[in-house]
């Protein structure tokens, strides 16, 4: 277990290289995002995803989202990206928006019980983007034990996750510990699943038909 200080110029490059190496080896890493710190693993290594779920104390019924380093990567994860998802991604990526889409059935991964869908986000944080640019898609969840407060620093995450994580990347306190907003784009009409850093009103400025909690029937 190693903790690196990415705010130090002389340590940043070594930190990112260590995280990339750990992910490629199937180990877990903690890294900053533009919301809360995340615990991540190679999305295509099923044993790494299982280790992530164990570290958090979660089961397969709570599959982790996937972080990507570019908008183009999302196109490689789906057979066809709905126009609503494409519009939302164009408006809010990189940023605090997670879109749920149907993933390509040919993908060789096992994120848990997803029923053919995946939640995807491109974070707005330079450290995360540098790691993702080299590792490819990563399964990433908030860096805390299930039921515990989200970690606002890598040091906080280490107190909860300990030796279950190989590399911790510290980049100072999170600027905003509000989680990302989640929108389900798998149906004909997008549905807000979680209100987070982006309000429903902001989402509707791009896709007016998006349904919110007040639109649910009895």
Image (cartoon, rainbow, N blue to C red):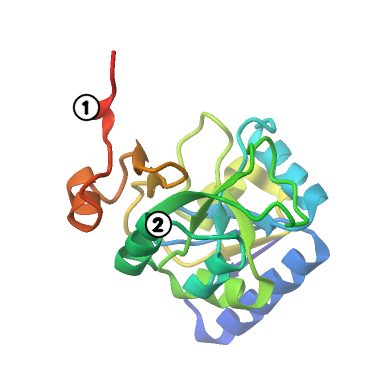
Quadrant of residue 205 within the rendered picture: bottom left
Locate residue 129, reporting x and y percent.
51, 73
Quadrant into which the N terminus falls:
bottom right
Q: Position of residue 191 (x, y in %)?
A: 35, 39
Residue at x 46% of width, y 61% of height: 33
Q: Is residue 210 shown above or below 89? A: above
Q: CA distance from mark 2 to mark 1?
A: 21 Å
What is the count of numbered marks?
2
Q: Residue at x 28, y 24 (%)?
A: 216
> In terms of secondary structure, where does tag 1 sit?
helix
Q: Of marks 2 and 1, which one's residue comes earlier in the chain?
A: 2
Q: Nearer the viewer, residue 49 or 151?
A: 49
Which residue is located at x 59 percent, y 71 percent? 132
Q: Residue furthest top?
A: 218
Q: Image point 68% across, 78% down: which residue?
A: 17
Q: Is residue 70 above or below residue 23?
A: below
Say if residue 6 shows up in the picture.
no
The location of residue 81, given as percent across then percent down, is 49, 60
The numbered mark at residue 85 is 2
- Compared to residue 33, the image places residue 7 above or below, namely below
Disc on res. 5: none
- Residue 63 left/right relative to 36: right
- Please state if 118 lies on the left or on the right of 206 as rendered: right
Does residue 73 sit above or below 102 in this rendering?
Answer: below
Question: Which secondary structure lies at badge 2?
Answer: helix
Task: Give the mark toward the camera: 2 or 1.
Answer: 2
Q: Which residue is mark 1?
A: 214
Is residue 83 visible in the rendered image? The answer is: yes
């Amino acid at each position: 277990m190693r903790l690196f200080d990415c705010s130090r110029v002389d340590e940043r490059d070594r930190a990112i290289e260590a995280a990339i190496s750990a992910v490629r080896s199937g180990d877990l890493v903690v890294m900053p995002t533009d919301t809360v710190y995340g615990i991540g693993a190679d999305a295509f290594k099923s044993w790494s995803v299982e280790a992530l779920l164990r570290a958090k104390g979660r089961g397969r019924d709570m599959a982790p989202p996937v972080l990507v380093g570019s908008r183009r990567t999302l196109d490689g994860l789906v057979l066809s990206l709905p126009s609503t998802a494409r519009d939302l991604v164009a408006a809010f990526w990189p940023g605090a928006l997670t879109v749920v889409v149907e993933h390509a059935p040919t993908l060789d991964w096992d994120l848990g019980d997803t029923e053919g869908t995946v939640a995807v986000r491109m974070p707005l944080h330079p450290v995360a983007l540098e790691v993702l640019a080299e590792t490819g898609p990563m399964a990433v969840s908030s860096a805390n034990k299930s039921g515990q407060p989200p970690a606002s620093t890598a040091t906080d995450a280490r107190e909860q996750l300990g030796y279950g994580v190989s590399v911790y990347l510290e980049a100072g306190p999170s600027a905003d510990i509000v989680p990302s907003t989640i929108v389900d784009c798998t149906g004909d009409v997008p549905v807000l699943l979680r209100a987070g850093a982006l309000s429903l009103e902001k989402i509707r400025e791009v896709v007016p038909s998006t349904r919110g909690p007040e639109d649910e029937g009895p």
